[in-house]
Image: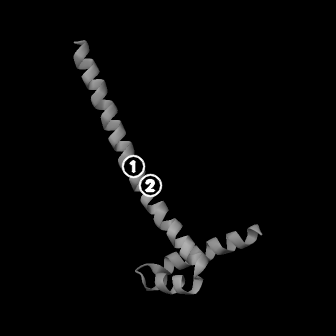
């Protein structure tokens, strides 16, 4: 019976590790896209805003960028 418990514990540990890996990808991917967007926006603000404006729901992103810009400009 002890072997079964160990097997079950190993299975649960493996399942938790796999789910944590999947969750990390689902969290890391959007953050990486956001980081790239902010980097591009810092280098070429006009072209980045034009690109975002052409995307579906781009107006919402542009509004969020305007709010972010006002927050960042308040820091200095």
Residue 27's disc is: 2
Which quarter of the figure has residue 55? bottom left
Looking at the image, which is closer to me, 63 or 27? 27
Quadrant in the picture for residue 70: bottom right
Q: Does residue 28 lie above or below 49 as drawn?
A: above
In the figure, is residue 37 to the left or right of 20?
right
- C-beta proximity under 8 Å, tags 1 and 2: yes
**In the image as oriented, which residue stretches furthest toward the top?**
1
The alpha-carbon separation of the residues under discs 1 and 2 comes to 6 Å
Q: Is residue 4 above or below residue 20?
A: above
Q: Is residue 22 left or right of residue 39?
A: left
Query: Which residue extends farthest front?
Result: 43
- Quadrant where the N terminus sits is top left
Residue 10 to residue 37: above or below: above
Disc 2: CA contacts within 10 A as few (<14), some (14-19) or many (>=20): few
Residue in the image at 50% along x and 69% along y: 36
**Badge 1: how crowded within 10 Å, few (<14), some, or many (20+)?**
few
Name the residue that disc number 1 marks.
Answer: 23
Would you place residue 17 above or below residue 59 in this image?
above
Q: Residue at x 54, y 79 (%)?
A: 62
Q: Position of residue 39 (x, y in %)?
A: 56, 72
């Amino acid at each position: 019976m002890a072997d079964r418990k160990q097997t079950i514990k190993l299975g649960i540990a493996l399942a938790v590790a796999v789910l944590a890996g999947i969750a990390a990808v689902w969290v890391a991917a959007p953050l990486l896209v956001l980081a790239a967007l902010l980097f591009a926006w810092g280098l070429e603000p006009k072209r980045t805003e034009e690109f975002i404006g052409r995307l579906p729901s781009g107006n919402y992103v542009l509004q969020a960028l305007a709010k972010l810009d006002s927050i960042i400009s308040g820091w200095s």
